[in-house]
Amino acid sequence: MSVPEVDASEAQYRGPGTMPLLRMTLLGGFRVEHADALNVVSGWPRRSAKTLIKLLAAYPDHAMHREQIIEVLWPGAAVNSALNSFGKALHAARHALEPELARRQDSAYLRLTDGMLFLNTDHVRVDADRFEQLAEAALSRGDVTAYEVALAAYSGELLPEDLYASWCADRRSSLAELHIRLLLGAAESLEVRGAYDKAAGHLREILRQDPAREVAHQRLMRVYTGMGTPEQAIRQFQLCEDVLQRELGLPPQRETVSLYHDILASRLPGQTSMRGPDSAPAGPRGPRPGAAAGGVNPGGPFVGRQRAVQRLADQLARHDDGRSGMVVITGETGVGKTRLLEEFAAEAAGEGALVLWGGRGAHANQFACGPFAVALEGYADGRTEPERRGLAHCYPALTRFVPSLGLAGDVPATTADLRTYHAELIATIVRLLTDLARTRPVLIALGDLHGADPVSLDLVRYLAHLAMRRPLLMVGAVRDEELAADIGLRQMVEAMTRARVCLRIDLCCLSRRSCDQYVQAALGPDHISGELLEQIYLRSRGNPLFIGEIVREIGAYGAAARTSAGAREGLAVAESAPARARARMATRLASMDETLRRVLGLAAAAGETEISLSNLRTGAAALDPPVAGAALFDALDRALQMRLLEERSAGYAFRHPFVRSALFGCLPRHRRDEFQAAITAPLAAAGIRPDTLAGIGARRPRSAGSRREEHWNARRPC
């Protein structure tokens, strides 16, 4: 009796339903696990076995002829050698997927028939296949929910660890293009619904993957216009124009240019009036949530800094030789360095960057690498428990440095050598940051650099050079007076700037126009007298902190102080120092030595008039006890270095009248009398009338019988 010929694989196959389902993940990284026990396949005795499985999983229909596989994995090898390698790889792959597989028993997952090798799709599920099915269904339906479900199934590009392997390039490109089509479709559906924020997020994700995708630029311009931010749409057109020229050498399409002109001319449906490019600048951003009573926003309007934000954004987005790895923002106290950094960080996060905050105050500088510890703790704390455990496993040196990672795994013992520990820590931080920058731009907002520990500055120097070729940018702030006083920090910034690894942005006070915009936005729509606007600018000299203090006080005093009818009250507020400012100055004075406080008191007693060195020396000698010449000169040096005083043609004066008013106003009455008495004689000898001397109460409003005046006078004492 003859026995029919049967393929060995069919004879040994155990039939459906007897084996657990095998899940293969290709998107975002290769992973194989058994669905029933969630047992991850990790024992790959041969690298070629793992590559063989990847090849079959990525190939259409998951079937390839043996000769095709040999041509991909062992090109140019002799026939016998290649067949031997194929056999060994197949054997290793079968036993990796089924460790208990008996000898001569064929795998339920891999089948070899007539030279064709198959993944048995009855028992194998590939995530890329599921994504394709969901994507095609979503594109045919055009439903937002279907789009979101399909997008959730795309966990990253295909096999990123095999980025340069040609055998998976076509499938990777096909899936990436399908993902972009989904994002475009979802953005269009969300825009129709009026969900502009989500639509903009999808479009920005497209541009992160493909910056030259012009249709995404077009739709993002429309979305920004629909959100009521046409200035963002104009900026998006400029970004589109730049990237098309840089990457393709092409101008924008006619449709994009036409859309740009429609936005400028406010011709889009529902668009409010848009100023043209030659008109006055657009108004400041509206108040943030939580504005204080009286219409004054605690954070203050953000005006006059759009160009600085754009310079920072350009550095984060650049990929050419002109890119810097570090940006240092310098400026005087209160000029808005931290606020600029916050606004830029918010914009960068909106564009898809990972923002790591290294602390907004001096507390982060109290220990080695403090700003980076704060930044990485903020990142780790936002991860899931499995993600934190993964980070602790990959970067063990951080487990004693970042509390959230120390809780996620075993904390290794510290080394007795502090230098070795710091060296290992720096290397690990650099590795983590560069790994994070592989997937999207990373912004490290370091906050204040003055007072940073030496280890942090060493890390900043090292990272700044590495970041020039990566989408990684560090931004820090430093006050002018601190930069002048800290020789080491100043030399570091100057050396990095000369080497072009650091960009320095000197933040100046606001212009008169920007100051007016700030006041009008902060105090609300009421008419504000031109005289009051001028006085606020003269008193603040455009310093946003001082402007904010004045308008906060005016806002609390009442609406009448803002208008022409109540000009006298508003001017009185503007010309004096609000209580908050005096309290802040009192705290600052308490940290100074006594000689410096007395010299500043003398200078403040001279009013807003310049005081010559000779008159200052005479006044210092009239104090009890007197301030000697050498001590006076040392105090003047510190006052100039701290940018409290500045040299003028006839002597010295406070850089800001507001600071002088606040300083003199926070002194007790007997001190004010002492300083005025000491300075009166030399000033009178110089021909200056005594009634021009400073007196914090001399400019207060006087109105007999007025309840408003009583309320005002009750508010003014220190």
Image (tube, rainbow, N blue to C red):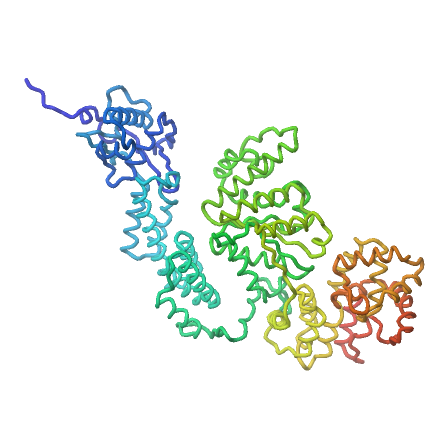
Residue lying furthest front in this view?
498
412 or 649, nearer to the observer: 649
**Residue at 57% from the left image edge and 34% from the top image edge:** 397
Percent position of residue 717, x then y? 80, 66
**Residue at 79% from the left image edge and 66% from the top image edge:** 653
Say if 671 sits above or below 56 in the image. below
Residue lying furthest top in this view?
1
Which image quarter holds the N terminus?
Answer: top left
76 or 358, nearer to the observer: 76
Q: Is residue 678 left or right of residue 92?
A: right
Residue lying furthest left in this view?
1
Q: Is residue 695 left or right of residue 73?
A: right
Percent position of residue 5, x then y? 11, 24
613 or 55, nearer to the observer: 613
**Residue at 19% from the left image edge and 30% from the top image edge:** 115
Percent position of residue 126, x then y? 31, 39
Q: Is residue 534 left or right of residue 636?
A: left
Say if 34 sits above or below 669 in the image. above
Percent position of residue 621, x then y? 92, 61
Which image quarter holds the C terminus?
Answer: bottom right
Residue 25, picture quadrant: top left
606 or 665, nearer to the observer: 606
Number of residue marks: 0
Residue 597, picture quadrant: bottom right
Residue lying furthest bottom in this view?
565
